[in-house]
């Protein structure tokens, strides 16, 4: 089991301030690194438990924060980020940076096999090729995508990437 505390600092691209309902999630990179140190101590000697890094999304974390945390962290930790989950996110990223989310991520950070790009349902062909070359994982969550009414990830068109599927706390069961 891997514990992935989430860094969430902003309400939108360009470091937009948090809304009232988001403020309880907000923390700085410094606080996040302190939290990671506490977790490392707590998990010491626990062979079946690990920790990793999680940046909520490009809209909720600044580049400098990600760079700071990556530089200060164990280089073997997995890295998790929600990205390109909805077309609105892609459009907002284009308006903010002139680039699609995955293209922006790959241009600014050293994405490799430690990374899991969660949802990643709105990637273009070039972004899919970047994902394949880096050996990062496309972390798919069909229940979340279904609950949000998000377009499904097309596995038929992509055979060259590593992918995994997960569940959601929103999963419903029926008698």
Image: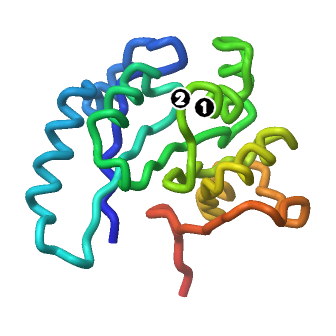
Nearer the observer, 159 or 55: 159
Please give the name of the residue rendered at 66% of the width and 42% of the height, measured from the top-left corner.
Answer: 85
Q: Secondary structure at mark 2?
A: loop
Q: CA distance from mark 2 to mark 1?
A: 8 Å
Question: Where does label 1 land, which residue?
Answer: 105
Splitting the image into 4 quarters, where does residue 65 fall?
top left
Question: Quadrant where the N terminus lies?
Answer: bottom left
For residue 33, above or below residue 29: below
Nearer the observer, 23 or 74: 74
Please give the name of the residue rendered at 60% of the width and 61% of the height, measured from the top-left corner.
Answer: 141
Please give the name of the residue rendered at 25% of the width and 31% of the height, measured from the top-left corner.
Answer: 24
Assess whether mark 1 and mark 2 are in contact (beta carbons under 8 angstroms). yes
In primary-sequence order, the first of circles 2 and 1 is 2
For the residues carrying marks 2 and 1, which lies nearer the camera in this image? 1
The circle drawn on residue 58 is: 2
Please give the name of the residue rendered at 79% of the width and 47% of the height, measured from the top-left corner.
Answer: 128
């Amino acid at each position: 089991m891997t514990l992935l505390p989430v860094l969430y600092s902003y309400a939108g691209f360009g470091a937009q301030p948090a809304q009232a309902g988001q403020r309880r999630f907000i923390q700085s990179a410094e606080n996040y690194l302190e939290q990671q140190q506490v977790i490392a101590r707590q998990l010491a000697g626990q062979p079946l438990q690990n920790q990793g890094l999680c940046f909520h999304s490009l809209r909720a974390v600044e580049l400098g924060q990600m760079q700071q945390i990556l530089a200060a962290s164990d280089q073997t930790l997995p890295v998790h980020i929600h990205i390109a989950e909805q077309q609105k996110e892609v459009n907002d990223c284009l308006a903010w940076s002139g680039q699609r989310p995955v293209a922006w991520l790959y241009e600014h950070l050293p994405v490799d096999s430690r990374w899991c790009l969660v949802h990643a349902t709105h990637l273009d062909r070039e972004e899919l090729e970047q994902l394949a070359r880096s050996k990062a994982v496309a972390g798919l969550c069909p229940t979340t995508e279904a609950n949000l009414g998000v377009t499904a990830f097309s596995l038929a068109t992509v055979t060259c990437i590593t992918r995994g599927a997960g569940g959601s706390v929103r999963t419903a069961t029926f008698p």
